[in-house]
Image (cartoon, coloured by chain):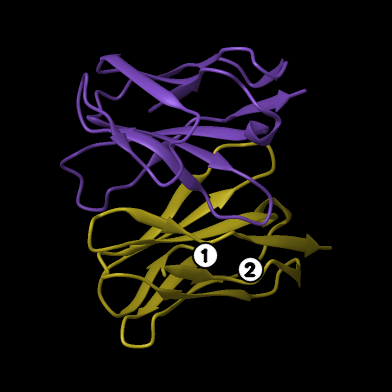
Amino acid sequence: GQNIDQPTEMTATEGAIVQINCTYQTSGFNGLFWYQQHAGEAPTFLSYNVLDGLEEKGRFSSFLSRSKGYSYLLLKELQMKDSASYLCAVMDSNYQLIWGAGTKLIIKP
Amino acid sequence: DVKVTQSSRYLVKRTGEKVFLECVQDMDHENMFWYRQDPGLGLRLIYFSYDVKMKEKGDIPEGYSVSREKKERFSLILESASTNQTSMYLCASSFAGADTGELFFGEGSRLTVL
């Protein structure tokens, strides 16, 4: 079966760095996505990785290792507004998205 | 600014009622999707559409149907609502020619079936 695993919840301190991991087992691979979802709001696109390596976009970076079936989202200089759920999704060989259950990130002052 | 609008943020229906959830996008996207989101589970695809009048079953189509009569509008229909359909329903759209296949989501419709 296809599976995406990510931690259910993480807590971090304002101003710090946090890494949210995502491991996957899917039928084929056509890219990995990270979305941010604030409580009661729509998910919004953060990043897309299809090749191995690190993609940096401001305070957020996303890393992919296809051989290990592994990705992480790195958030630097955490702000209170970063408190949200972070969803990992993989596009399989049929170009269908397989979603993880999401990681709820709690930022404390 | 791109926008996906879902007609109702909150609905309360009774078992057996017919429920319509409407979704409209203003980005001229070809692809539209209906997901449900439940605690502890990833988004699950109900139906999707790649073009007007086209529809494809997703992972959990049972108990649902869809309609896409116009490119900008994708409707989800629960013919006879049941309590296990209590959930958050998310509509999304994407541009067929996009490199990344990025999805644009609506803010969701939270349905409670009593």
Q: Give me the residue at 55% from left, 37% from top.
A: A42
- Tell me the residue that label 1 is attached to: A59
Is A19 on the left-hand or right-hand side of B58?
right
Q: Which quarter of the image is occupied by the N terminus of chain B?
A: top left
Image coords of residue A4 (percent x, y): 49, 69
Chain ID for yellow: A
The secondary structure type at the circle numbered 1 is: loop
Q: Visible in this render: residue B25? A: no
Q: Give me the residue at 52% from left, 65% from top.
A: A59
Residue in the foreground of this view, choosing between B98 and A79: B98
Contact check, label 2 and label 1, Cβ < 8 Å: yes
Image coords of residue A45 (percent x, y): 43, 49
**Disc 1 marks which amino acid?**
Arg
Q: Visible in this render: residue A102? A: yes
State the image quarter where residue A2 is shown. bottom left
Q: Give me the residue at 55% from left, 52% from top.
A: A36
